[in-house]
Amino acid sequence: EEKIIVKDLAEKLDKNPNEIIGKLVQLGIMAAINQEIDFETAELIAEEYGIEVSLKESEEEKVEDPEELLDFEIEEDDPKDLEFRSPVISVMGHVDHGKTTLLDAIRKTKHVDTEAGGITQHIGASEIAINDQKIVFLDTPGHEAFTSMRARGAKATDIAILVVAADDGVMPQTIEAINHARAAEIPMIVAINKIDKPGANADRVKQELTEHNVVIEDWGGDVIAVEVSAIEGSGIDQLLETILLVAEMEELKANPNRKALGIVVEANLDKGRGAVATVLVKNGTLNIGDNVVVGLASGKVRAMINDSGKRLKKAGPATAVEITGLSEVPKAGDKLIVVDDEKMARNIAAKRQSKVKLDKVKSDKRVSLEDLYDRM
Ligand code: GTP
Ligand code: MG
């Protein structure tokens, strides 16, 4: 671990040591003029002055250019390495319009149709298989922070199923869901649900959707709508066929032979297991023992469990897994990246944490440097 004495840093930056000490205080570090601080902290201070510092030491250290680490560049895949992958579907819509019931109905269909497991829901994501074709579903309402994920435009899923209750019609959250799908630039399939109800009116739903520029196929648009009853199980097969059709048109591909890239669907702190995160592997393959950075957390993947509670050694593209081994609980929407070694993972997470701290201090206008001096 590289260190530098505050006085020396001040000299190198051609600044008053007290000013440097003030900056350190802003970072939450209490250091005296003759005290050592670590290199990463020094870098942050230097950055504040728009000065780039580098370690002259080893080649390895040079690779860890702070800029590069903060905005981690992910290599593009060579098209020839891409293979078809399963679709990941988000189920969205207004409260109580039947998203979860619809997923239950879909899982039941699967239960009847195939032998393979994968229908439980311990991890907020479920996988089903139709004629060997896997589909991954994410039920959005359970994951509140999912909203922030979409807000950031993260393409977490490939297709959105917009559930609209036929007896209730387009409601505020329906519109919000439409906007999320648009922001994520993913195709939408409308599931007009509760068609069994006496007050159901599918045409009215289509009419209302048109008002929000979602035009159904039989109304001359390009959005497919399927009438379903999640309770009675009607229309489910047609919905699944539609999903496969739309997925096929999307030509979803990934490179299973690269380091994994994923996104956190949900995360929490488990008493026994520590930080637990459900991660959707978007590209590459995640392995036990991989060194990862997930938002502000880092770690080594200790265990992976799929949606049916099965322990996995590997998780390829379009697989949702619950992982343990992280230093802290990440946020939903955080990206997971696999890096070469443990040290690199820790360094990136540490830099991100310092950066967040620094940004917070910068935005905290109530505390000026002068105030700090007065307090000292
Ligand atoms: P949130 O997660 O709270 O946003 O709700 P949701 O969209 O997941 O709705 P949920 O599946 O919890 O269903 C809400 C209510 O509608 C429940 O009482 C369901 O039984 C009922 N329901 C769902 N689908 C149907 C349907 O096709 N027909 C009828 N009659 N009732 C349904
Ligand atoms: Mg629900």
Image (tube, rainbow, N blue to C red):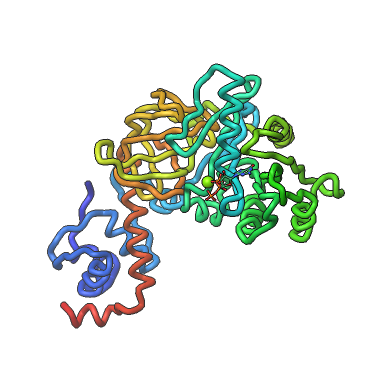
Residue 208 % position (x, y):
76, 58
Relative depth, front residue between 358 and 31: 358
Residue 285 % position (x, y):
48, 29
Q: Residue at x 19, y 82 (%)?
A: 374
Q: Is residue 226 left or right of residue 302?
A: right
Q: Is residue 95 visible?
A: yes
Residue 25 % position (x, y):
23, 69
Q: Residue at x 42, y 52 (%)?
A: 70
Total marks placed: 0
Residue that sits furthest to the front in the current view: 198
Relative depth, front residue between 202 and 250: 202
Instruction: Write down the quadrant of residue 13 in the picture.
Output: bottom left
Residue that sits furthest to the top in the current view: 115
Asked if 335 appears above or below 43 in the picture, the reply is: above
Q: Residue at x 26, y 54 (%)?
A: 39
Instruction: Write down the quadrant of residue 193 in the picture.
Output: top right
Residue 352 % position (x, y):
37, 53
Q: Is residue 75 left or right of residue 348?
A: right
